[in-house]
């Protein structure tokens, strides 16, 4: 067998002038994320200077930002997985609402001692009710995810259209179940001991939960076979199929997983507000996807950045809070997020061509 | 160039009576083909003769309308490509089928990943170091030296990507290796290396099927030649003594004889 | 033999005749009764929504008092075509008056105009029509609530301090009318600063982040006004998370269950609530009064002047939460107000 004697022909093409870009750099996707992070640092500095008494730089302000962002950041990290496989889910906002309605009702049914709101009620079986509510919230979200997965893999409808449909269905079901009214039967303990509580007064529990889960998601995509298979589905669906991957089963798992995260966020709603939030979450799915893409996850699949998604999603949170603190109306943040998203996708595409 | 070990009568991989229709197009009309262990079979045919379709049927990528496939003598119910892969059959596809964003080591081990030992392994954690070492070794055995295997496939040149695809297939085959245009993107030197690889793979005892438009090179290493014309086998015999013009004649000959029918089956 | 047959025939005729007389009298009586009893039809979307359902309770109670027949129905969701088709199905029964909550200010103009022309008065208990072709419109009077709110706020924290406002959206007239009058009155006091209104679109998450930012920037913030239930839930969450329950007081609007719970807990100081019950009651009363004065299906109905009838709102606090008067201002899915 002849051995190649022409090393020139077989050296890899230099990337960004470096002969050996590392895996870590590839996973972090240096450019866009660093740029967005810099913008956020600048915002923190500017808002800190402009805010009365520089309150933007206090621990209390950090705590507020953490809890403000906990839900959307967790959603952005979860959605990143789906984007990595080349799929979308825009039904997540309705998923959150439906999960909180179903889980909240179950929680109320177990813990409330009276159905009449005017009777000063105490709650019984509180721990059982809370845990059951948590399980039901996650299960509801996962079920909706399974519906999405089924339609995408068995009925071969693309995920955008599919989740557009389930968005409407979930909204309708939530409307029917709730009659348009938010609940009041959530035990106070859930809110007081978890939803509004912080560790050492600085780390809100919902944000800690989100942080732990996000680290888990990062480890999953970076180190495990599941993460590798997810990326290969997005990079080239056909190549993944030819490699013998069980594509349909993997996609189903992804949709169910992301749906389960939606359910968990519904539970966080119940914990923070002691009620459902059926009028909210209108733009959550799009904000999560925008956050992921701004943070360097490719819209076309194959490249993700979990921590980038966190940074991308925090942009709107920092802007929103900062603008209120300095006394400006918060409409402009929608415009800025839209502009940043377009710029991020533009840079993303240019980088695809360079490589 | 006669193979050693052609004594076994059981084919490494065989397809019998494959029929496939795509809408109005009859891609395969009852084609049959056998590849014995240690044997190199060159599959020739004009564009649209059905070569790639036949290979896809043998792999399990495309389900035939009728026909049977057997691997190592046993008939297999092909529901997916997993069936052939589990039995030691792998392929180099015409479009390479390498995910562009995965690194070289990840692409080479996709579907055959190596896990870490112990608890981490049970959680699904990959052993990238082991896979990187093995990838480098496999590529070096093919005479390819990359400074690192941790770069995305899309940053490689076309020829390097082809080499990776060949290396990958060679790594995972133990029964039969099917190759669709394995030298298409390669220059002369690299094409020679791939042909050397094919010979050494067959020498290991595998059956190798090569689809190629590069008649001279592949004819030189093949034991047997099969020519497909309009979805059916027009010739199946030893390569010894055949010349390139003769093969071309068989490939296009039937066209001139046809009464206006066009061979427009997918290849 | 002849005599026996004639007797039989005579008895038969007599029996039939008596039966006919009795039946005729009965029909005549019920016919008279039907002609006398008026029928008012209630049409609404979101029929199970606890903030709207009491409309029917009030109307039903008033209808019983006046001896008038009353029905109420419609789609359970915000479905305009379904509400229209329900209205049309009711019109087949020829109601003498209609009580309506139109989901769309334009889609219902044509049917209402038609009814008014045919001498059937239509009263709205929520929503608007453009143009206003209805007989009367019963709207909750939030503008005079401004005085209630500002004096309560001044009483709660003295004449100095900062007040924040979280509202739905800048283009919603029905939302502005809740906070603007109070804000104007409060601004008139030198010691009071009213922060620029922030909008959260009835999203509790956004309301919470706005409230926490306000509290960060203004340590002397003492009151936050939230213009509806979901906003107040978000603001309450932020106040609790900052550990400022009791120090920052929350003023809410409407009385859905979470707001009532908040008042009971002490997180919400008070809410300004409206009474769909009273609206339904007054609307039905006015419809019946019109029909009794002008006749049923008589000449065309002209919109009344003034066309808008303000229905008073009520401040609900922990003190009056359980009183009978307050019950009519609290959202309820059924009519069991007084159990």
Image (cartoon, coloured by chain):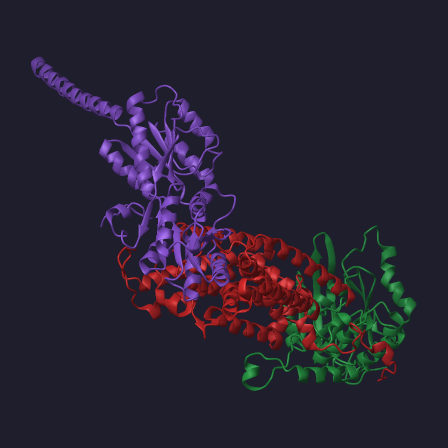
Q: Position of residue C338 (x, y in %)?
A: 23, 48
The chain letter of the green chain reads B
Q: Nearer the viewer, residue B201 or C260?
A: C260
- On the rendered image, what quadrant is the N terminus of chain C found in? top left
Q: Report which colour depicts chain C.
A: purple
Question: Which quadrant would residue B78 be assigned to in this image?
Answer: bottom right
Inspect this view and state whether residue A154 appears: no
Q: Nearer the viewer, residue C132 or A14?
A: C132
Q: What is the display colour for chain A?
A: red
Residue at 73%, 61% (x, y): give it.
B28
Location of residue C140 with respect to B46 vertically, above or below: above
- Please say if A47 is above or below B164: above
Q: Which residue appears at 31% of the width and 33% of the height? A: C284
Rendered location of residue C59, percent (x, y): 30, 37
Residue farthest along the front direction in this orientation:
C190
Question: In the drawing, does residue C89 fall left or right of residue B117?
Answer: left
């Amino acid at each position: 067998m002849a051995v190649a004697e022409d090393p020139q022909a077989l050296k890899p093409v230099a990337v960004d002038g470096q002969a050996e870009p590392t895996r870590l750099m590839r996973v972090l996707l240096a450019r866009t994320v660093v740029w967005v992070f810099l913008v956020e640092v600048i915002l923190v500095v500017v808002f800190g200077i402009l805010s009365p008494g520089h309150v933007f730089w206090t621990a209390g302000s950090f705590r507020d930002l953490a809890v403000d962002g906990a839900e959307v950041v967790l959603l952005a990290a979860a959605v990143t997985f789906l984007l990595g496989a080349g799929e979308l889910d825009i039904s997540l906002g309705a998923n959150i609402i439906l999960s909180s309605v179903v889980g909240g009702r179950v929680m109320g049914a177990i813990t409330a001692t009276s159905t009449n709101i005017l009777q000063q009620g105490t709650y019984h079986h509180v721990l059982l009710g809370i845990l059951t509510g948590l399980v039901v919230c996650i299960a509801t979200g996962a079920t909706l995810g399974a519906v999405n997965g089924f339609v995408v893999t068995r009925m071969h409808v693309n995920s955008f259209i599919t989740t557009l449909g389930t968005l409407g269905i979930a909204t309708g079901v939530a409307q029917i179940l709730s009659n348009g009214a938010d609940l009041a039967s959530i035990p106070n303990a859930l809110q007081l001991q978890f939803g509004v509580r912080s560790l050492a007064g600085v780390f809100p529990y919902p944000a800690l939960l989100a942080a732990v889960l996000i680290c888990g998601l990062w480890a999953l995509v970076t180190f495990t076979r599941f993460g590798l298979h997810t990326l290969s589905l997005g990079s080239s669906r056909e190549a993944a199929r030819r490699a013998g991957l069980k594509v349909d089963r993997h996609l189903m798992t992804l949709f169910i997983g992301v749906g389960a995260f939606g359910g968990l966020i519904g539970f966080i709603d119940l914990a923070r507000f002691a009620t459902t939030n059926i009028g909210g979450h209108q733009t959550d799915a799009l904000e999560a996807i925008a956050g992921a893409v701004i943070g360097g996850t490719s819209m076309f699949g194959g490249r993700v950045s979990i921590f980038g998604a966190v940074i991308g999603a925090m942009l709107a949170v920092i802007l929103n809070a900062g603008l209120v603190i300095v006394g400006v109306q918060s409409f402009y943040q929608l415009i800025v997020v839209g502009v940043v998203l377009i710029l991020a996708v533009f840079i993303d595409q240019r980088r695809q061509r360079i490589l | 160039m006669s193979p050693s070990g052609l004594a076994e009568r059981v084919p490494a991989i065989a397809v019998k009576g494959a029929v496939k229709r795509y809408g109005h197009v009859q891609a395969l009309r009852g084609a049959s083909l056998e590849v014995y262990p240690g044997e190199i079979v060159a599959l020739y045919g004009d564009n649209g003769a059905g070569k790639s379709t036949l290979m896809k049927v043998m792999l399990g990528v495309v389900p035939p309308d009728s026909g049977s496939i057997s691997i190592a003598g046993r008939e297999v119910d092909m529901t997916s490509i997993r069936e052939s892969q589990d039995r030691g059959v792998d392929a180099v596809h015409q479009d390479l089928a390498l995910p562009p964003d995965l690194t070289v080591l990840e692409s080479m081990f996709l579907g055959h990943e190596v896990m870490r030992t112990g608890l981490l392994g049970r959680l699904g954690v990959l052993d990238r170091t082991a896979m990187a070492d093995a990838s480098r070794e496999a590529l070096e055995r093919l005479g390819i030296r990359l400074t690192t295997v941790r770069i995305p496939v899309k940053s490689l040149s076309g020829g390097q990507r082809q080499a990776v695809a060949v290396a990958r297939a060679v790594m995972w085959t133990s029964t039969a290796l099917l190759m669709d245009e394995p030298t298409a993107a390669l220059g002369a030197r690299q094409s020679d290396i791939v042909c050397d690889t094919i010979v050494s793979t067959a020498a290991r005892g595998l059956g190798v099927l090569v689809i190629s438009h590069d008649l001279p090179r592949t004819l030189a290493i093949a034991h047997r030649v099969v020519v497909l014309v309009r979805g059916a086998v027009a010739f199946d015999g030893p390569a010894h003594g055949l010349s390139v013009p003769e093969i071309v004649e068989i490939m296009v000959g039937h066209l001139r004889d046809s009464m206006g029918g066009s061979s427009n089956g997918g290849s | 033999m002849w005599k026996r047959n004639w007797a039989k025939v005579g008895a038969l005729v007599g029996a039939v005749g008596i039966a006919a007389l009795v039946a005729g009298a009965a029909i005549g009586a019920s016919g008279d009764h039907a002609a006398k009893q008026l029928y008012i039809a209630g049409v609404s979307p979101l029929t199970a929504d606890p903030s709207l359902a009491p409309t029917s309770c009030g109307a039903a109670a008033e209808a019983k008092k006046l001896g008038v027949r009353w029905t109420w129905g419609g789609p359970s969701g915000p479905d305009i075509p379904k509400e229209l088709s329900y209205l049309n199905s009711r019109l087949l029964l020829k109601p003498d008056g209609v009580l309506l909550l139109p989901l769309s200010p334009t889609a219902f103009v044509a049917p209402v105009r038609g009814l008014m022309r045919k001498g059937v008065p239509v009263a709205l208990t929520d929503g608007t029509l453009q143009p206003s072709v209805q007989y009367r419109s019963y709207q909750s009077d939030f503008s005079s609530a401004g005085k209630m709110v500002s004096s309560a706020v001044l009483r709660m924290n003295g004449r100095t301090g900062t007040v924040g406002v979280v509202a739905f959206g800048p283009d919603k007239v029905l939302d502005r009318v809740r906070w603007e009058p109070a804000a104007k009155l409060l601004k008139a006091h030198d010691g009071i600063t009213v922060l620029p209104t922030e909008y959260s679109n009835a999203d509790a998450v956004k309301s919470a982040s706005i409230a926490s930012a306000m509290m960060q920037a203004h340590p002397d913030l003492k009151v936050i006004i939230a213009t509806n239930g979901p906003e107040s839930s978000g603001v309450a969450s932020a106040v609790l998370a900052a550990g400022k329950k009791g120090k920052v007081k929350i003023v809410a609007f409407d009385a859905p269950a979470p707001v009532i719970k908040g008042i009971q807990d002490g997180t919400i100081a008070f809410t300004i609530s409206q009474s769909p019950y009273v609206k339904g009651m007054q609307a039905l009363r006015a419809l019946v009064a019109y029909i009794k004065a002008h006749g049923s299906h008589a000449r065309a109905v002209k919109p009344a002047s003034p066309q808008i009838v303000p229905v008073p709102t009520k401040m609900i606090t922990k003190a009056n939460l359980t009183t009978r008067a307050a019950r009519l201002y609290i959202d309820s899915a059924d009519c069991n107000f007084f159990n």
